[in-house]
Image (spheres, rainbow, N blue to C red):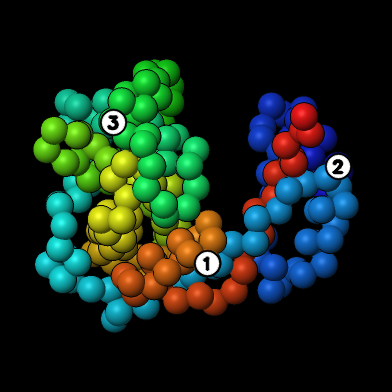
Amino acid sequence: MTAVRQRQRDLGLPEAFEWVHDNNPELLAVARSAGLSVLEAPLMVLDPTALPPAAELGGPAVRILDPAAPGFATDVAVRRAVAAVGFAAPGTETGAAGPTARDAALVELPVDSLDEERARTAAGGRISALVEMPGEGAVASGMALRVDDVAEIAGIATLPSARRRGLGAAVTAALARRLLDDGTNLIFLSAGSDEIARVYLRVGFRRIGTACIAEPAPAAL
C-alpha cells in the first residue's frame, strides 16, 4: 500500500483506495496503520423489480444531461458545483447553503475536461442528472459511470437548503431507470452512511456488503 501511494504521488494522482471489505477484510487494519482514513460505506445493488415508477416518487422532474445540447458545458459545471456544496455538508440534515453557495462554487471546465465529459457521455459511459426548482435553479445532482453492462451511481448530492424533499432519491431512481433502459444488468453504489443508505433503500437498492474508501487522514491542527 505504501508503494502504491508513492506511485500515485509520482503520477500526480489522488492517494485513494477502494475495496470490498467482505472480500479483503485484512486491508482495513493495513490502511489505518498506514495513516489512511477509511470510510466503511454500505455497498448496495439495485433490484430492478423494486425500482418504483417515477410517478410513484413524485416531486420535480429529473433532467438527464444531453451532450449535444448547447448548454452542456454549463450543466456539467453546475452539476459539479451542486456536488461540491452538498458534499461539504455530509448527511441528510437541512442547512443554510443553497443556490448562492452553489453559484460561488461554479468553476468553468478546462477544454480538455469538457471534451472528455462530452465524449464519455455521448458514448454512454457517463450519465449526469440535475433537479431544478423554479427560482432556485439546480438543487440536486448525480451521475453514473458505466462499463459494458455494469454501472456505478455516484455523486448524489442535494444542496443543504433543499434537503428532506426526496430529491436524492429521485435523482438516483432516474439514473437507475436510464441505465436499465440502456441495457445495464448490474447497478451498484456506495452510501456515505447508514442514514444515507436508507434513501437508496426507497428506490430499490439493497445492501450486499461494505465498501471501504481510504484516503490520507486530515492533518491535525
Residue matched to label 1: 194
Q: Quadrant of residue 199 in the image? A: bottom left
Q: Quarter of the image holding residue 122?
A: top left
- The residue beneath circle 2 is 3
Q: CA distance from mark 2 to mark 3?
A: 42 Å
Q: Residues within 10 Å of mark 2 (few under 14, many from 20)?
A: few
Disc 2 element: helix
Q: CA distance from mark 1 to mark 2?
A: 32 Å
C-alpha span from label 3 to label 1: 27 Å
> Which dot marks residue 99?
3
Please give left or right for residue 88 compared with residue 143 in the image.
right
Residue 83, image x and y in percent? 41, 39
Q: Which mark is in front, 1 or 2?
A: 1
Residue type pointed to by label 3: Pro
Residue 204's x, y, as percent? 34, 74
* Residue at 32% across, 34% down: 98
- Amino acid type of the residue tagged 1 in the rendering: Asp
